Image (cartoon, rainbow, N blue to C red):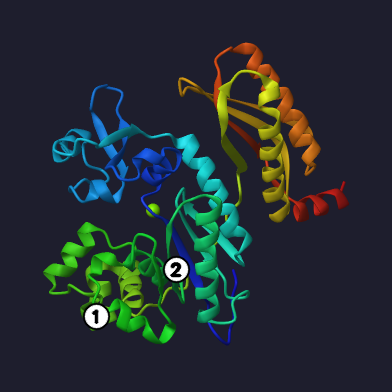
Amino acid sequence: MVSDKGRGRIVMHVDLDYFYAQCEELRRNDLKDKPVVVCVYSARGGDSGAVSTCNYKARAYGVKAGMPIVQAKRLLKDAQDAVFLPVDEQYYTSVSDTVMAILRANSDAFEQVSIDEAYMDVSIRCKDFDGAVELASRLKDEIKATVGLTCSIGIGMNKLIAKMASDYRKPDGLTVVRPEDTQEFINPMSVGKLLWVGKKTEATLNSMGIYTVGDLAKVSIDRLIREFGRKMGVYLYNASRGIDEEPVKESAVKQISRMTTLKSNTSVIEDMLDDLNTLSMEVHKSLVEQRLLFRSVGVMLVYEDLSMRSRVRVLKHYTDRVDDIMRYARVLLEEMLEESNKAVRRLGVKVSDLASVEGQETLQRFM
Ligand SMILES: [Mg+2]
């Protein structure tokens, strides 16, 4: 936990915009101006299943996450160019990994909450909120330049406010809520915008005549505890005042991966070696930046028919040598090419089984 007694904290919440659908736009340029709906198809086949994410073009037709695919198709029946795609978790993860590594490298404490959301404590590296705004806009540029994605960032004095700030202006937003403006910022919001206030709590609050956070801030703590129990009552009392002591909890990196689309589909290893080495070096760069060691190397292939395979080799020792990544990635690629003669469309390299350099130094001292 990063703390600063004199000044309080500066926390950012980063939310990648309409993430799965934006990833699909990233690899298919022709999707940009069309309604794109990424779906989780159920095992029953056909159009059974639900919408996972959709872009803003699709949202204009009323399509929403969680909606049955059939309903989304009905809403989009007049949009000739609507595109429905299945979720490609592995691809989104590799895109997310790249973004998260950039964010982590710019945080004092970093907590990834999901594939497309993270909190950053920047209290030490940023002198003040102006410094944090500068950092946030630099991060937005860097993510746009290196990955091609837009995100929305909120800055506040804690996680609660940072999250509400990132939600305030989307997509491609940057919202800063300074400590002195916090109450004014949250007062007009509906109580449902508070973290942990779900539909049920919101309905109960509404039935008590409490609609906005400002309404909530006028209610006594005793009444809130009577109505919601101690834990939730105290939480609501504090949240309505913008108070949130939750630290940004450092989360461990599980793997680092990079993927690329080959210039042309091929099953010849010589055509892939340049890309394989470049990917290995990029993975290595991120590894070193985060002061990590690895013990497993993996290669991922997406074939021309879009089927996917991956293979991992576990090494005897932890290492951070780029030569090890290149060498084992090549061995794995050779093995995989021998087993299938389908042409490869996308190639990826990853390292996993990660440990921090510091942890290993401590370990070795005791061995
Ligand atoms: Mg998002």
The answer to which quarter of the image holds residue 49 is: top left
Badge 1 element: helix
Q: Nearer the viewer, residue 256 or 276?
A: 276
Q: Which residue position is annotated with label 2?
A: 159
Is residue 128 in sight in this rendering? yes
Q: Nearer the viewer, residue 337 or 328?
A: 337
Expressed as whole percent of the image width and height from the top left, the position of residue 10 reads 52, 75
Q: CA distance from mark 2 to mark 1?
A: 19 Å
The answer to which quarter of the image holds residue 341 is: top right
Q: Nearer the viewer, residue 114 or 258?
A: 258
Badge 2 element: helix
Give left or right: position of 29 versus 276: left
Name the residue located 17 percent from the left edge and 72 percent from the top edge.
211
- Which kind of residue does numbered mark 1 sit on? Gly
Is residue 352 in sight in this rendering? no
**Dot 2 or dot 1, earlier in sequence:** 2
- Which kind of residue does numbered mark 2 sit on? Lys
Q: Which residue position is annotated with label 1?
A: 214
Name the residue located 22 percent from the left edge and 41 percent from the top edge.
67
